[in-house]
Image (cartoon, rainbow, N blue to C red):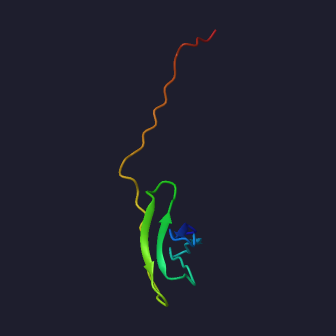
Amino acid sequence: VNIPVTLATSSTTGLARTARTDAFGDYRFSALPPGEFTLSIDVAGFLPVRQSITVSPGATLTQDLVLELPTQVTQVVVRADAAATLA
């Protein structure tokens, strides 16, 4: 589906990577150092997703992320003045 998933760490390494989901919605980050990370997805029309994860040495981690629609409907109001007259 080609949705960007960002992985970042708040440690001093400043590591940040982006992967894209495949046709099944799967994504993969390889060769990560152990530590605390934040996965995030920002897609127009959906609520932002943030998930903290801990990567352990030699471990394989599966983390599902769910895109949700906003519960609040945004309303756009357009107004026009009828001050102009046609001749």
Q: Residue at left 41%, top 67%?
A: 66
Q: Residue at left 44%, top 64%?
A: 50
Q: Residue at left 42%, top 43%?
A: 74
Look at the image and tell me in which quarter the C terminus lies.
Answer: top right
Return the residue nearer the eye: 20 or 81.
20
Q: Residue at left 51%, top 77%?
A: 26
Q: Which residue is most to the left?
A: 71
Q: Position of residue 86 (x, y in %)?
A: 61, 12
Say if 75 sits above or below 16 in the image: above
Q: Is residue 65 visible?
A: no
Return the residue nearer the eye: 69 or 59.
59
Say if 51 sits above or below 79 in the image: below
Q: Position of residue 7 (x, y in %)?
A: 53, 71
Left/right of residue 14 with respect to residue 58 in the rendered view: right
Look at the image and tell me in which quarter the N terminus lies.
Answer: bottom right
Q: Is residue 47 visible?
A: yes
Q: Position of residue 32 (x, y in %)?
A: 55, 81
Say if 47 sits above or below 39 in the image: above
Q: Which residue is most to the bottom?
A: 58
